Image (cartoon, rainbow, N blue to C red):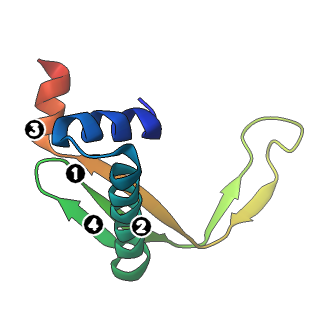
Amino acid sequence: MKKNDIIKIMAEKRNISLKETAEIFDTLIETIKDGIVNDGIVDIYGFGKITVDNVTEKNKVYTVGHLKGQAYTSPAHKKVKMRFSSKIKDLINS
């Protein structure tokens, strides 16, 4: 399912225009992005939780390819994780 499919379904369910639904959807996405960037967490009950974790710098060794055995450093960075709620997992597994 793509963004336009979601917008069309939302518009039909709420009996509002596609333009207005697209604006609402875009506002929702922007709000979620702001929460991820500013707070590092967005928790939507019954759907899932998006978190940002700090990953520390690590020394690693290549295990395949022509660089196999050579050491390198994986720089510190942030990692975004999405964990779905048990309600969503149950829907998928039923």
Residue 57 falls in image quadrant = bottom right
Between the C-alphas of marks 1 and 4, the distance is: 8 Å
> Mark 2 or mark 1, which is nearer to you?
2
| Position above or below: 85 against 30 | above
- Within-10-Å neighbours for mark 1: few <14, some 14–19, many 20+: some
Crowd around label 2: few <14 · some 14–19 · many ≥20 (10 Å) = few
Give the mark nearest the N terminus, 1 or 4.
4
In depth, the one of 54 and 57 nearer the eye is 54
Q: Label 2: which residue?
A: 30
Distance from label 3 to label 4 (Cα)?
17 Å
Q: Disc 4 on helix, strand or loop?
A: strand
Query: Label 1: which residue?
Result: 48
Distance, label 1 to label 3, CA atoms, is 9 Å
The quarter of the image holding the N terminus is: top left
Residue 29 in picture, x, y percent from top left? 39, 60
Question: Secondary structure under badge 3?
Answer: helix
